[in-house]
């Protein structure tokens, strides 16, 4: 298979965003959110946290916490790991922005 044979699909495997309900639990695909995952390299935890603070305008969230702000939000995922989110319509290239900030 060549790259030209690939077909874009959504997270739930469809051609368009879907809403699935199973046993009373509803799962809706969110298409208006850009996400980028950040994990500090070993020995670079403080430097990463400092650079994230500059990007986010506040300290990266601690365990079990989230920072809900604009334009960027952040959710703690694990020790020295965060998920950064922003509006997709204005931050489609969020991963490039985050990578450049770090």
Image (cartoon, rainbow, N blue to C red):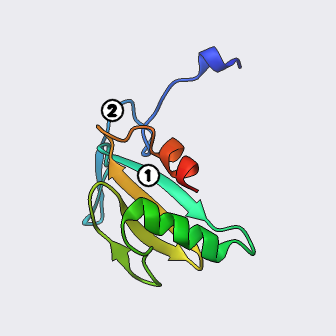
Q: Pointer 2: residues within 10 angstroms few (<14), some, or many (20+)?
A: few
Residue 48: x and y in percent read 60, 68
How many marks the image carries: the answer is 2
Q: Pointer 1: residues within 10 angstroms few (<14), some, or many (20+)?
A: many
Farthest bottom residue in view: 63
The residue positioned 45% from the left and 45% from the top of the image is 94
Mark 1 or 2 closer to N-term?
A: 2
Residue annotated with mark 1: 35
Measured Cα–Cα span from mark 1 to mark 2: 19 Å
Say which mark, if any, is on residue 44.
none
Residue annotated with mark 2: 16
Q: Are marks 1 and 2 in contact (CB under 8 Å)?
A: no
Q: Quadrant of residue 31?
A: top left
Front residue of this view, candidates 10 and 34: 34
The answer to whether 25 appears left or right of 15 in the picture is: left
Front residue of this view, candidates 4 and 27: 4
Q: Can you say which quadrant of the picture contains the C terminus? A: bottom right
Residue 53: x and y in percent read 45, 69
The residue positioned 31% from the left and 48% from the top of the image is 30
């Amino acid at each position: 298979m060549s790259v030209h044979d690939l077909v874009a699909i959504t997270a739930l495997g469809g051609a368009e965003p879907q809403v699935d309900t199973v046993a009373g639990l509803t799962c809706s695909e969110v298409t208006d959110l850009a996400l980028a995952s950040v994990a500090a390299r070993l020995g670079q935890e403080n430097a990463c946290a400092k650079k994230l603070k500059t990007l986010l305008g506040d300290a990266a969230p601690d365990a079990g916490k989230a920072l809900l702000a604009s334009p960027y939000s952040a959710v703690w995922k694990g020790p020295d790991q965060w998920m950064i989110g922003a509006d997709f319509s204005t931050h489609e290239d969020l991963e490039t922005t985050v990578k450049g900030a770090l």
